[in-house]
Amino acid sequence: MNAFRLLNIRAASSALRTSRQCKVIPVRAFHQSVPSLAAKVVSTRKLLPESQARLEAQDLDLVQWPEERSMPRDLLLKEIKGAEALICMLSDKIDKEILEAAGPQLKLVTTMSVGFDHIDLETARKNDITIGYTPGVLTDATADLTVLLTLAAARHMKQGIRAAETGEWTEFRPDWLCGYQFTNKTLGVVGMGRIGEAVARRLKAFGINRVLYWGRKEKPALKESLNAEFSTFDNLLAESDYVVTCCSLTPDTKDLFDYNAFSKMKKNAIFVNISRGAVVQQDDLIRALEDNLIAGAGLDVMTPEPLPLDNKLFKLKNCVILPHIGSATIETRETMGQMCVDNVLAALNNKPVPYALK
Ligand code: NDP
Ligand code: DGY
């Protein structure tokens, strides 16, 4: 257990919370307790350098997990006690047990993600805990990666790279690794939110000529700006050459894509998921790919994460898998970190939290 250490940064005084004049005690063993008058903030991971430096410069009793993996749950349960704010990641399950272990002083849980399906919103509401998140700033990075995945799945990128690297590429063959292009094709966006719209705009530039979308409600402005048509789910499945899933994970969207849904899609269709793994019945996706119900898939999210190495999805030639890196650009991740810090400082100073769920 001694290998588990927490980064503990404590201020010398409890003067102004925004003060940058603080004493930093870099690392302590997790079981030691250092009394402090400053507000306790727990962060389940370190942020990127600039946002991390800004966080450390505050007058806080900061307890942070410095390792390259999530803070173990038992440690989070222990350390959250007495915290006024928590910075968490999408991989941390922030449920009733964690929220209640914190105590009544917990004001804010701010996640370094736009998705908040890992947080128990009802318990947070009941306990008057504000939920902070990072909407908007990751839209471009994630939409770029979605285009990459869509192209990769449509153009046999996985097999192509493997063939080039293993010597399987022996000569130019006119019929080898032929995929599909975007020109004059139909794109179906499941969840036309910020990311869905940014994906549609990008793919239109690649030649997509018809955009269908499905969600909770029609968005008339998209008719004018993108010529996008609101569709039923089944119609979108039947008519799209590319089905890209960008919706939030909710009880309504969980398991949305099952074998029945895949069987309604075109045989040449490419399925892409960047939302959350649980939107897909993963065993049904595997069967759909094995049975050639669809031509290929590109996944940035799956269940569980990380996907065990013996999972069948890795063995399928027509499935491209990325390790949940949609928002992973330095610029975006720095900004996400800064938003978490902004949220923490606002909450501790009893100001409106700037990036909060309504
Ligand atoms: P938005 O809130 O802008 O969009 C969410 C979309 O989900 C909306 O179109 C909404 O539909 C739809 N939706 C929500 N609830 C339902 C429901 N019950 N039934 C049908 N559709 C629903 O969020 P973003 O575009 O910023 O992000 C979307 C998701 O992408 C995140 O929640 C996250 O899970 C995922 N994500 C993944 C990343 C990655 O690294 N792979 C990076 C960033 C985000 P409507 O428009 O009708 O309200
Ligand atoms: C999110 O923000 O929800 C992504 O999954 C990671 O950035």
Image: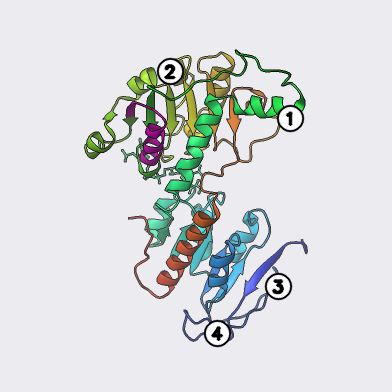
Q: Nearer the viewer, mark 1 or mark 3?
A: 1
Quadrant assignment for the C terminus: bottom left
**Which mark is drawn over residue 28?**
3
Q: Which mark is residue 21?
A: 4
Q: Earlier in the sequence, mark 2 or mark 3?
A: 3
Name the one closer to the observer, 8 or 22. Answer: 22
Numbered label attached to residue 165: 1
Residue 81 seen in the current view = no
From the image, which quarter does the N terminus lie in? bottom right
Of 44 and 271, the residue lying toward us? 271
Relative image position of residue 274 (x, y in whole percent) = 49, 37
How far is disc 2 from disc 4 in space, using C-alphas?
60 Å
Q: Is residue 181 magenta?
A: no
Q: Is residue 187 visible?
A: yes
Indicate the amino acid at tag 2: Met
Direction from residue 320 to residue 356 in the image, left or right: left
Q: Residues within 10 Å of mark 3 (few under 14, many from 20)?
A: some
Secondary structure, mark 4, is loop
The image quarter in which residue 254 lies: top left
Crowding at dot 4, Cα within 10 Å, few <14 / some 14-19 / many 20+, comes out as some
| Three-letter code for the amino acid on which mark 3 is drawn | Arg
Q: What element does badge 2 sit on? A: loop
Mark 3 vs 4, N-terminal side: 4
First in sequence: mark 1 or mark 3? Answer: 3
Q: Residue at x 51, y 30 (%)?
A: 151
